[in-house]
Each structure stands twice: as C-alpha cells, then as structure tokens.
Amino acid sequence: GIQVEQSPPDLILQEGANSTLRCNFSDSVNNLQWFHQNPWGQLINLFYIPSGTKQNGRLSATTVATERYSLLYISSSQTTDSGVYFCAVVETSGSRLTFGEGTQLTVNP
Amino acid sequence: ETGVTQTPRHLVMGMTNKKSLKCEQHLGHNAMYWYKQSAKKPLELMFVYSLEERVENNSVPSRFSPECPNSSHLFLHLHTLQPEDSALYLCASSQEGRAYEAFFGQGTRLTVV
C-alpha cells in the first residue's frame, strides 16, 4: 500500500512564528487531506487538496501531485494551533484514507 | 462542528462489560467508518460501511461488532474487551468514491480496566 511520511515529527514554536509541515507520499493520489487533531482528540478538516494551492486565514497548503508531496504553512502561530497535524491520502488505485504519523506542534506563549 | 457526532465522549468499562459506541452523521453521506487511534500510532481503519453494507473489515477481533442500521447511524458494540483495546475510537463519514472528503466525529476515548 501507499506510504505517507510526515516531517518533522515534533515542532516547538514561539507564538508568532511561521512554520512549514511536509507530507511525502509514495504513489499517485486522487485525494489528500490535512487535519488538525485538537487536545480533546477531534480531527478538524483543514484542507482537501489533491493538487494546487489553497489558503484559509493564517493557514495555506500546496500539493504538488507530480512530485508526491504536500506542504502545510502556518503563519503567525497561536497557542491554539497546538496539536497534531495529520496528512491523509487516497491512492489512485484505492478508495480509503491512509494517514501519516502526524506532526506534533507545540506553540508556546 | 463537523456534522458527525459521537457518543459517549469518554467510556470506562471492565473487561466483562458490554457497551456500545454511537455515531451519527448529518451530512447526507453514504459511507461511514470506524477508526482506532492508539497512543503513539497512526489511525487504523477498522470497518467500512457503504450504503449500509459492511464492505471492509480489517482483521478486527470479533469482540468488536459494528452495526449500521441506516446511512446516518453507525454503532460499535463492545464486549469482553482487553486492556490493550484502550484507545481513541473515531467515526468518519464521506460520499463513497475515490476522491471523497472525509469528516470525523469528536471521538470516544475508551479505557478498559
């Protein structure tokens, strides 16, 4: 099956800093989603982005499907951005989401 | 609010108990999923229901028994669980297909004592 690798595994920032999270995948995909898991466990949809670039407030994401990676940008980070960020994909030959292991983000005041 | 609601949010049960987790979606989707998230591990897909039929069971022990009475509701019946079954159980829904966007519930944090 498809492999999904996220980096870095852990990231600690001061409030106001910017960051980039990366997701590499091993095969072609027709679905890619970024999620934020809050401290209570809920997965919040950030982006549905199988290709191209999207922006939502301080967050933006870019997927370069031909090169098999996606980037999540967080600008002017806030303490409420803390949590785990997951990338999940559906490979072209499949139909189920495969998750990466996540990036644990801690934003300190 | 994602449109997918799970209850209860927390559950502590003994190994001889029987309990059920409930999931309800208000998004008009036709596929529903149970995922398990153990500490320090990625999300693992347990069951998939499409149009109320179970289409996938990823080698899950029989002490976990899913039920999908209609396209809006999904249950996970639990009996004689083991302490290693303690985890966060997440429900999701989507439109069945290759390029769907999935939405998740808040999760049930289960502790087996």
Image (spheres, rainbow, N blue to C red):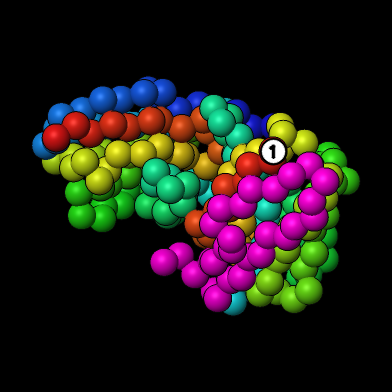
Q: Count every numbered label the image shows and give the total.
A: 1
Name the outermost residue toward the right: B62
Range of residues picked out in magenta: B1-27
Where residue B30 sits, quadrant-wise, is: bottom right
Who's the residue at 30% across and 52% down the image?
A: A54
- Disc 1 secondary structure class: loop
Residue placed most toward the observer, A71 or A109: A109
**Amino acid bearing label 1:** Val
Residue placed most toward the observer, B87 or B97: B87
Who's the residue at 69% across and 38% down the image?
A: B113
Who's the residue at 68% across and 59% down the image?
A: B21
Q: Quadrant of the C terminus of chain A?
A: top left
Chain letter of disc 1?
Answer: B
Q: Which residue is mark 1?
A: B113
Who's the residue at 47% across and 39% down the image?
A: A87
Can residue B109 be spotted in the picture?
yes
Q: Is residue B58 above or below residue B97?
A: above
Instruction: Indicate the position of residue A1 as horizontal and vertical percent values.
Output: 69, 32
Can residue A36 be spotted in the picture?
no
Left or right of residue B16: residue B92: left
Instruction: Indicate the position of residue A80 as horizontal and vertical percent values.
Output: 25, 46
Q: Is residue A73 magenta?
A: no
